[in-house]
Image: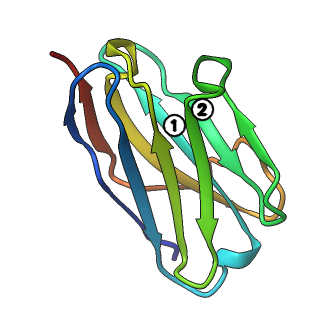
Amino acid sequence: QVQLVESGGGLVQPGGSLRLSCATSGSIFSITSMGWYRQAPGKQRDLVAAIAPSGRTNYADSVKGRFTISRDNGANTVYLQMNSLKPEDTAVYYCSGARGYDLRPRDYWGQGTQVTVSS
């Protein structure tokens, strides 16, 4: 069983930055694609970014140039660096994973972390 634990959410002003982290259990991290999704109240859960074991990435158009996904295979952790945050980035952010190459990973989920962008 793969467990994902997110951290790093919080309240930030527009234009600010946050870094989310997702720590995973198990020994399969290096062969697992990882992703970040977000869900705002009343809306569907949408992909924000994903990274394959090879390092290939996939981003939603709305975050390109502002967000960066990265992974540390030695630490079994994936990160989402979020810069130039906007109020519309406010949502619960979920870490996700899937074995192999999958740039929309949805097999495993974390519990979510709230990100609020407001002045």
> Mark 1 or mark 2: which comes first in sequence?
1
- Residue in the foreground of this view, choosing between 93 and 107: 93
Q: Is residue 9 above or below residue 83?
A: below
Q: How far apart in space, not on screen, are marks 1 and 2 (Cα)?
A: 4 Å
- Residue wearing tag 1: 37
Q: How many marks?
A: 2
Q: Residues within 10 Å of mark 1 (few under 14, many from 20)?
A: many
Helix, strand or loop at mark 2: strand
Residue 103: x %, y % from top left: 76, 45
Q: At x 33% / y 52%, what residue is drawn?
A: 111
Residue 13: x %, y % from top left: 22, 24
Residue 40: x %, y % from top left: 35, 20
Residue 108: x %, y % from top left: 55, 58
Q: At x 51% / y 37%, what residue is drawn?
A: 37
- Residue wearing tag 2: 47
Residue 60's disc is none
Q: Amino acid at mark 2?
A: Leu
Q: Is residue 54 above or below residue 44?
A: below
Q: Are marks 1 and 2 in contact (CB under 8 Å)?
A: yes
Q: Is residue 31 above or below residue 71?
A: below
Helix, strand or loop at mark 1: strand
Identify the image quadrant of residue 87.
top left
Q: Quadrant of the C terminus?
A: top left
